[in-house]
Image: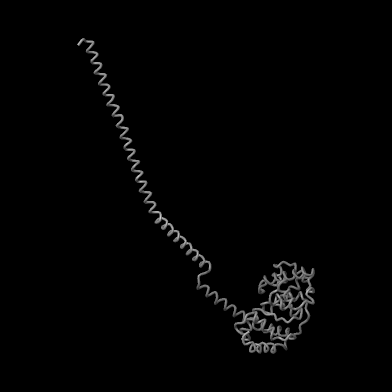
Amino acid sequence: MKNSAHYAKKIRQIVKDRAGSIPAVEPTDTIELIVRGILEEDVDPRKVPAALSAIKEEYVDFNELRVSPVRDIIDVVGEDYPHIRSKAQSIVNALQTVFDQSNALSLDFLAGKPKREIRKILREKLGLGRYPESFVTLYGFDGHAMPVDNLLLEALKIGEHIHPDSDLDDLQGFLERITPHVEAIVYHQALRKYVSEMARKVMRLRARQLKEAQAVESQVAPPAEVGKSVNKAEATRKDENKVVAVRKEKKESQPELKGKEKVSRKTSKSGKSGKVSGTKRSKSKPAKKSSRAAGKAKVSRSGKSAGKAKSRGV
């Protein structure tokens, strides 16, 4: 984090101002730590005790919670609890994974493992997020971890206790470096108390930012309309390309068509001339035949008249 020495003093001041009012932390079952860590992430700390109490009152034990439908957990905790649907699913998934690993709801299979390996198993096998993984590591295995979430990040930015360009990775690394191991739980509890004090300001800031984002979006065409206009433009370009291609093909084929037309005209003319000559020949032949027949008729008539004259004795 930029200017870390300056901001380290500010964080220590937050802890110093609130450390006196932090109650002693009692040992807690690691399975309950999983459930609590999931419920605490990015939620006003004042809402968590009631949610955890509702779960304990509804279910006989955490094994019954493990096999509970997600819908039932949502009903028990309340629909208005932040991110309750994803949190309920995370609780069921994590408890089921623990049961599959040890055939019981216990994290004893992690005992004796290095802290780094424990954190990796909590993240990768149990599927715990940044906050609950660090929470279980800190409270359940005395690991040097600092649970952080977006609510803490935004609260510290509003109070100018960290650099404004910081993200969750920056914040977690920074806090774990400046926090003494023996005071890690005190630091976390003091920061949670600070988040509780700043939660309303953070929510108001989020609401204002959401309105500003919606106002910006309203001035720009909705994504669906933008997509439609893009599709229309693409379709228009395709149509134009088709028209150009058709025109090009016509231009290229015009010389061939003209040559074909000339050939067809010549063949049609020759065909017509052939037909005409044929008709003339057909008409002339009968004429020749008729003249020959007339000649034969004249010869026969003259022969007959000569015969008649001889018979008469002329």
Q: Tell me the colour scheme of the image.
A: one colour
Q: Position of residue 314 (x, y in %)?
A: 19, 11
Compared with 260, 218 (above or below) is below
Which picture quadrant has residue 138? bottom right
Q: Depth check: give the residue in front, 219 or 150.
A: 150
Q: Depth check: give the residue in front, 77 or 195.
A: 195
Residue 207 visible, this orientation: yes
- Residue most toward the left? 314
From the viewer's perspective, tell me whether residue 253 is left or right of residue 132. left
Q: Position of residue 234 (x, y in %)?
A: 48, 63
Image quadrant containing the N terminus: bottom right
Which picture quadrant has residue 101? bottom right
Q: Residue at x 60, y 82 (%)?
A: 165
From the viewer's perspective, tell me whether residue 165 is left or right of residue 257. right
Compared with 272, 37 (above or below) is below
Q: Position of residue 150 (x, y in %)?
A: 64, 78
Q: Residue at x 29, y 28 (%)?
A: 288
Residue 196 visible, this orientation: no
Which picture quadrant has residue 42? bottom right
Q: Position of residue 49 (x, y in %)?
A: 72, 78
Q: Residue at x 72, y 66 (%)?
A: 69
Count of numbered marks = 0
